[in-house]
Image: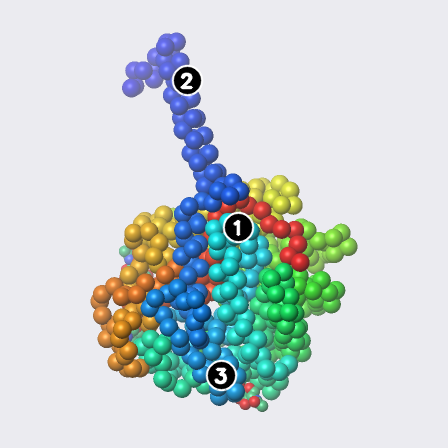
Amino acid sequence: MRQKKKSKGVCCWSMLALVVLAIVAVILLVVMVKTDEGSGSPGAPVKKYADALKLAMQFFDVQKSGKLEKNQIDWRGDSGLKDGSEAKLDLSKGMYDAGDHMKFGFPMAFTATVLSWAILEYGDQMQVVDQLEPARSSLKWITDYLINAHPSENVLYIQVGNPKLDHSCWNRPEDMTEKRPLRQVNTSAPGTEVAAETAAALASASLVFKSVDSTYASSLLKHAKQLFAFADKYRKSYSISIPEVQSFYNSTGYGDELLWAAGWLYHATGENSYFQFATGKTAETFGNWGNPTWFSWDNKLAGAQVLLSRVSFFGSKDVSNNDVLGKYRETAEAVMCGFLPKSPTATESRTENGLIWVSEWNALQQSVSSAFLAVVYSDYMLTSRTAHISCSGSTFKPSDLRDFAITQANYVLGDNPMQLSYIVGYGDNYPQQVHHRGASIPADENPSCKDGFKWLEADTPNPNIATGALVGGPFLNETYIDVRNNSMQGEPSTYNSALLVGLLSGLVTTSSVVQSFA
Ligand SMILES: *[C@@H]1O[C@H](CO)[C@@H](O)[C@H](O)[C@H]1NC(C)=O
Ligand SMILES: *[C@@H]1O[C@H](CO)[C@@H](O)[C@H](O)[C@H]1NC(C)=O
Ligand SMILES: *[C@@H]1O[C@H](CO)[C@@H](O)[C@H](O)[C@H]1NC(C)=O
Ligand SMILES: *[C@@H]1O[C@H](CO)[C@@H](O)[C@H](O)[C@H]1NC(C)=O
């Protein structure tokens, strides 16, 4: 080898050229395969994302409370039928938030908002793989509940079940016998974030159902407007009004929900008052311009920045040139720059193999939420023919953002050091002991509250598949302990699923978005 390198004969130059050509060809092939995987072509969905999307969508069926319709999950049945009866309301529908049987309004509303957003951006893509109808009906399962949870203008029921009581049981939802008390926010105990998030959910859902069922859409919008007014007029965090919620879904502030909800109401109504709100005093107070944040059930700022960038990309000239809108877009770009591994401002919150990793608890939430925002933003850029974003002097293309989203999705599907799929039911190697009561107990057993704990403790795979569940995720060192009581890593949630459905719908086929939701 050494000798050959030194030789300068013609034969060796041409050999070198051949080798170089071969290498170039291989690189080109790899790039082409990668690009194809990323963008697909209309009507040609990428199989692995299509398969994963179909599974992920089913987790909503796993989580449904109430009298089930067209139930596809053979180990699930009716449950929570009397939920709400204490206040003479029908709160039987909705979804259990995670592995237990609580119905927590704050994360449930966020699940609905994200699912609506996914449908609005990627309904066409969902349709290609027959997932639009399931997405809409799961969304409606939540919005039916949210409408009933809002019986008068300034009252919103935000919780069904007593978390201490619920968490002291390990049984199937079908066998619940413990009391299901309700919690509400109202004018003497307001909850701005939960009311505003519910407004966001109902406003975004009204856009989803506009063309399908206009009566239902109007009802959604009416409730959304009332809830937004309630949230804004009585400004107080529900964590302060009802301190017990702090142990479960503590809110670290309501400014983000107000802006996010105003953004959705503006999209849903086109009314100037919501635009003024989203770009006015509240935005100056809570906008946190220039500072990237993580998108989660608690903090929607990054989502609001991307959503309002939509107006900057596609709105008419009289609104799109607004200064404050420009700040939303600049901050959305700072968020995107943080995601891109080669950006000078790339976040360091990543595992060695590139997974966005922020928190030990439910680690995949931020990986998937970041990837979802990245694919949406890259599609805004493509559809508006925006060639690049600039990150402290380096420029990046829409495909760079999409490639980032693909790395996160592929990691979740098993492209990781453990070669473990984090979606239950996907691939050959996925978590077997997901922290999920219903999945852990054989469907023909009906243990009471306490009798079920032997199923929590059993060191055997779950007898029922919690199809499509996205578990919490790996440690920073990229390991995962598949033991049922490991709720930190092994508990799935509906909000994770909504984010995952958004991400996979964005990747399943060609990248494009509609210019207007309305
Ligand atoms: C208002 O909500 C608080 C907190 O849930 C509750 O304690 C109070 O009873 C409610 N007020 C009314 C009039 O129902
Ligand atoms: C809930 O969030 C608030 C605001 O960030 C914080 O002050 C409080 O300590 C949190 N409560 C818990 C139990 O973590
Ligand atoms: C990975 O991290 C977890 C949590 O910090 C720790 O418990 C575990 O021992 C680590 N595993 C390895 C192989 O380093
Ligand atoms: C499950 O884990 C929790 C928290 O670590 C612990 O308090 C509980 O005792 C464990 N339960 C069982 C049955 O192992």
Q: CA distance from mark 3 to mark 2?
A: 76 Å
Question: On the image, numbered disc 1 is attached to which residue?
Answer: 125
Residue type beneath disc 1? Gln
Kindly identify which residue carries mark 2.
17
Quadrant of residue 23 within the rendered picture = top left
**What residue do we see at 66% from left, 73% from top?**
222
Q: Quadrant of ligand 3?
A: bottom left
Which residue position is annotated with label 3? 84
On-image quarter of the N terminus: top left
Report the front residue among 452 and 236.
452
Badge 2 amino acid: Ala
Residue 427 horizontal/vertical position (percent):
33, 51
Which residue is located at x 47 percent, y 38 percent?
A: 36
Q: What residue type is disc 3 on? A: Gly
Q: Estimate the spatial distance between the alpha carbons at disc 1 and disc 3, rounded to whole Å.
A: 37 Å
Question: Pointer 3 and pointer 2: residues touching (CB < 8 Å)?
Answer: no
Query: Is label 1 in contact with label 3 (beta carbons under 8 Å)?
Result: no
What residue is at 48 percent from the left and 42 percent from the top?
Answer: 44
Question: Dividing the picture into quarters, in which one does residue 5 lie?
Answer: top left
55 over 87 or under it: above or below = above
Tell me which numbered mark, 3 or 2, is placed earlier along the sequence: 2
Query: x and y percent of residue 268 in the render?
Result: 66, 63
Does any portion of residue 503 appear in the rendered image? Answer: no
In this view, the mark in front (2 or 1): 1
